[in-house]
Image: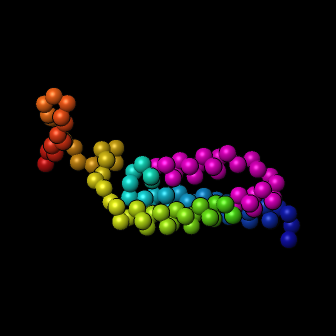
């Protein structure tokens, strides 16, 4: 097998891992966890984008696979603790009212 074919295969595996991590990140029930996992994935891949050392690339791929397994476990657990949707997620709108510093969230339906 030629060296170019091996590099192409590694690049394909890296893209596949990247897509899997992003897909799994989208499974979090909580908005903040979901966005953090996506951002962390993008940042990690961007940081190591220019890596050419095969040993280091394989090490990073193994670390990514471990992260994917951890994400799968965490997303299952997060499904048990679903909260109300946040406003940034397109949740229900409403207005805040209250006296002094008390804020009461009232929904308008």
Is residue 100 something one can see in this rendering?
yes
Residue at 40 percent of width and 62 percent of height? 78
**Of 6 and 103, which appears nearest the observer?**
103
Q: Is residue 12 visible?
A: no
52 left or right of 109 in image: right
> Dividing the image into 4 quarters, which one contains the N terminus?
bottom right
Residue that appears at 53% across and 47% down: 39
Tell me residue 37's x, y (percent): 51, 53
Residue 33 placement (x, y as % from top left): 44, 52
Which residue sits at x=71%, y=58%?
60
Nearest the viewer among 13 and 101 is: 101
Magenta segment boundaries in residue numbering: 35-61
**Which colour assignment does the render follow?**
rainbow
Residue positioned most to the top = 100
Q: Main secondary structure of the magenta part?
A: helix
Number of labels in the image equals 0
Coordinates of residue 57 in the picture (x, y in percent): 75, 57
Residue in the image at 51% along x and 51% along y: 38
Question: Residue 41 colored magenta?
Answer: yes
> Does the magenta portion include 70?
no
Residue 83: horizontal and vertical position, in percent?
30, 56
- Please tell me in which quadrant of the rendered image residue 108 appears: top left
Q: Is residue 98 above or below residue 27?
A: above
Judged from this view, the residue extending furthest toward the right is: 2
């Amino acid at each position: 097998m030629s060296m170019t074919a091996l590099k192409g295969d590694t690049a394909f595996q890296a893209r596949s891992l990247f897509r899997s991590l992003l897909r799994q990140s989208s499974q979090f029930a909580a908005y903040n966890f979901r966005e953090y996992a996506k951002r962390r994935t993008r940042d990690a891949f961007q940081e190591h984008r220019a890596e050419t050392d095969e040993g280091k690339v394989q090490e990073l791929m193994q670390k990514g696979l471990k992260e994917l397994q951890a994400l799968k476990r965490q997303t299952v657990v997060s499904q048990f603790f679903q909260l109300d949707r946040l406003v940034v997620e397109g949740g229900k709108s409403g207005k805040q009212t209250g006296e002094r510093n008390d804020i009461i969230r009232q929904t308008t339906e």
